[in-house]
């Protein structure tokens, strides 16, 4: 049987990762970009990554690297890219005008069955999809960088998205081994970035107020909270840290409110505090392409090992 086909629009960091994820799931992938050299570099990147992952026995899916590579082709013609696809994942730069233009073009060539999905990190579906003829088939599937190693996908519908589009997208993400979550409605920052920004804000305030050094602040996450957050969320943490949620609330509600009432205003993320944090983190990881690249590779290796471990430990 012919494998199902998806189109990836934009072959940058996120597009090339999606291509790998879909190929690992056995899908035929057409990778589209306006820049031929981006496509060439994407294919080189994908080949290198897949070979290395295969060598370290971390390649996803049941197919070999060569079999997965054979599923991926590139093209610079949008219509040809989308033809025969049941799912289109847009991964172009985070620019509303550009995304509206691309979805406008996709709207003209889409049939009534294909799902048109965007990787956007912060643009609301109502901004990107409103007015499209195929709005019922449009959805945001927001990945986490790098999607090959971090499986979460936030599925965010437009108010007019058909529930079947949400369900099909959810099922597809599960099928390719990602970990989808559904938002019932759109909200600024979706959920992941709202949680992330809450953390970043308090980190910024604590360092700015001289309570802790930038590097120690990061350790609080990596050797503290983060250890359990790789396995359980904050709500389950509450549940397990007492005799259930109600017991936790009974014990800690007043204490939590007391602390939360001391949180300061939204930081400016500039000026002296920015300089202080930049200096401390750059001392540890200089802002030099090779150093940043090596650190990212190390991060991805850690994520691969963690993913393997999570798979072994999975109980539900
Ligand atoms: P990127 O700049 O690495 O890649 C964008 C690609 O789109 C480039 O290859 C570029 O040539 C191509 N492109 C530009 N105009 C195009 C057009 N008209 N048609 C087709 N291709 C075009 O960007 P990225 O980091 O891969 O981000 C892509 C999307 O994913 C953004 O919406 C971003 O917000 C989202 N996202 C990014 C991250 C992240 O951490 N990078 C995480 C989650 C979601």
Image (cartoon, rainbow, N blue to C red):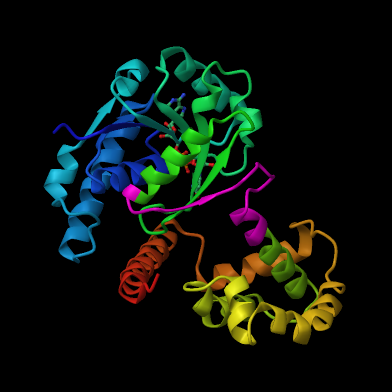
Residue 183 is covered by the magenta coloring: yes
Residue 32 in picture, x, y percent from top left: 34, 28
Residue 220: tell me if it is visible: no
Q: Which residues are magenta?
A: 175-196
Which image quarter is the N terminus in? top left
Report whether 260 appears left or right of 104: right
**Relative height, residue 190 to residue 196 (above, below):** above
Residue drawn at (16%, 50%) of the image? 65
Residue 139 in picture, x, y percent from top left: 52, 34
Q: Observer-nearest residue: 292 or 62?
A: 62
Residue 128 in picture, x, y percent from top left: 60, 28
Callout count: 0
Residue drawn at (41%, 62%) of the image? 296
Residue drawn at (42%, 44%) of the image? 14
**Relative height, residue 184 to residue 111 (above, below):** below
Q: Observer-nearest residue: 240 or 14?
A: 240
Report whether 120 appears left or right of 202: left
Report whether 185 appears left or right of 139: right
Residue 199: tell me if it is visible: yes
Q: Observer-nearest residue: 84 or 305?
A: 84
């Amino acid at each position: 049987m012919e494998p199902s086909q998806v189109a990836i629009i934009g072959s940058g960091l996120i597009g090339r990762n999606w291509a790998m994820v879909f190929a690992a799931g056995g899908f035929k992938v057409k990778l589209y970009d306006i820049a031929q050299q981006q496509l060439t570099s994407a294919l080189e990147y994908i080949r290198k990554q897949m070979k290395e992952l295969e060598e370290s026995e971390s390649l996803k899916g049941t197919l070999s690297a060569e079999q997965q590579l054979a599923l991926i082709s590139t093209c610079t013609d949008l219509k040809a890219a989308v033809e025969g696809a049941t799912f289109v994942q847009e991964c172009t730069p985070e620019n509303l005008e550009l995304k509206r233009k691309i979805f406008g073009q996709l709207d003209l060539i889409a049939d009534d069955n294909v799902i048109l999905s965007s990787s956007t990190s912060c643009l609301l579906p109502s901004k990107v999809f409103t007015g499209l003829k195929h709005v019922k088939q449009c959805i945001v599937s927001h990945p986490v960088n790098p999607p090959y190693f971090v499986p979460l996908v936030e599925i965010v519908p437009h108010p007019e998205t058909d529930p079947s589009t949400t369900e099909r997208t959810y099922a597809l993400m599960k099928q390719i081994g990602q970990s989808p979550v559904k938002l019932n409605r759109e909200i600024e920052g979706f959920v992941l970035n709202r949680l992330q920004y809450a953390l970043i804000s308090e980190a910024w305030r604590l360092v700015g107020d001289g309570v802790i050094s930038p590097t120690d602040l990061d350790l609080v996450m990596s050797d503290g909270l983060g250890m359990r957050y790789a396995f359980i969320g904050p709500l389950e943490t509450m549940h397990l840290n007492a005799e259930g949620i109600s017991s936790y609330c009974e014990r800690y509600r007043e204490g939590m409110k007391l602390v939360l009432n001391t949180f300061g205003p939204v930081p400016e993320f500039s000026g002296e505090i920015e300089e202080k944090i930049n200096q401390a983190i750059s001392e540890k990881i200089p802002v030099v392409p090779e150093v940043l690249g090596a650190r990212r590779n190390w991060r991805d290796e850690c994520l691969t090992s963690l993913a393997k471990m999570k798979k072994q430990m999975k109980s539900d």
